[in-house]
Image (cartoon, rainbow, N blue to C red):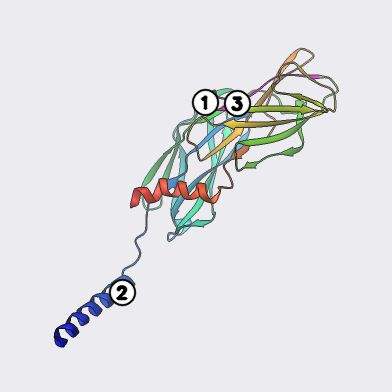
Amino acid sequence: MRTKTKYLLAIVIFIILGSTIFKSITPNKIDKEIYFLNTSAYVSGYIGDEINIPLTFFYDAKKPTDKIISNVQLLSGNFVSLKGWEVKDGSKFKGYQLNNISINLKIEKEGKNELEGIKILLYDGGEKIYKFDKFIMLGINKPKSDNYLNVASEETYLSQNDRTSFDVKNNSDKTIVLDDFGLVSDNAKIKQFKLQMNDNIFDKIKDVNVLPSNIFKITIETDPGDNSDIYFIKPYIDYRIDGKKFTDCITFGTIHGIPIADEKLLNIYNRLIKNKNY
């Protein structure tokens, strides 16, 4: 009986040791997939403007950053061209690197254009198509030299939630009449709007007079209208001076959803990677 017990024990030890040795000599498998977060953008800008937008993605941290992406191309965009791109390192999360491709888009023509996505060429010879949730750009034909309205001192570049704010100064020597404030698509909506100027508060823009050198602050809460993890908003303002109409895109825009909260990041990881691979 003792002999049989020793024999079984020896088999168990052999299996454990064999498993340990196998694990030590077998390299960890590298996940070659690139997992893009859902990203959308609603951008107004002047013809000739170059606008930088980050597209965030996960990839296996065991693979060097400079050995993944060899080139990036736009899938479509008659009014917009891709002037450059750059991969920027971020943080690590559960064995994956959270990086972004920073794409530099130039507005070439006046009008509205919806971008389909990008094609990514990989160093291993493969390619990946990444389609945007919604990516709409509005080109405005207006001389920048006017500079009637400018951000005064406050502007939100990154917002972890759906809120953003900025203040604007009337740089002209005339009264400016504000007519409208909006986004470039009905898909994205402004849920809450507040304009504050001195002691006056407005819940919408319509025939609001701004005297020379006056400053007003706009605070908005937006809804991208889709399942975006990250979205970029760059609104526009319609106004008049001496009856002449202008459209202005004053701010640099706000990237919403960054920095990504830990709980949200875990949910994104589970959706994109864990639930797919396990």
Q: How many marks?
A: 3
Classify residue 11 as left or right of residue 98.
left
Q: Residue at x 42, y 49 (%)?
A: 270
Residue 20's label in the rendered image is 2
N-terminal of the pair, mark 2 or mark 3, is: 2
Q: Which residue is mark 3?
A: 183
Establish if 2 lies above or below 169: below
Spatial distance from mark 2 to mark 3, Cα to Cα? 59 Å
Q: Is residue 204 left or right of residue 216?
A: left
Give the residue at the far top of this rendering: 243
Q: Secondary structure at mark 1?
A: loop
Main SS, magenta region, reads strand
Quadrant including the N terminus: bottom left
Question: Disc 1 marks which residue?
Answer: 187
Q: Secondary structure at mark 3?
A: loop
Q: Which callout, 2 or 3, points to the residue nearer the camera?
A: 2
**Is 236 in front, or is 209?**
209
Task: Count neighbours of disc 3 (C-alpha within 10 A) and say few if under 14, some if 14 to 19, many if 20 or more.
Answer: many
User: Amino acid under label 2?
Assistant: Thr
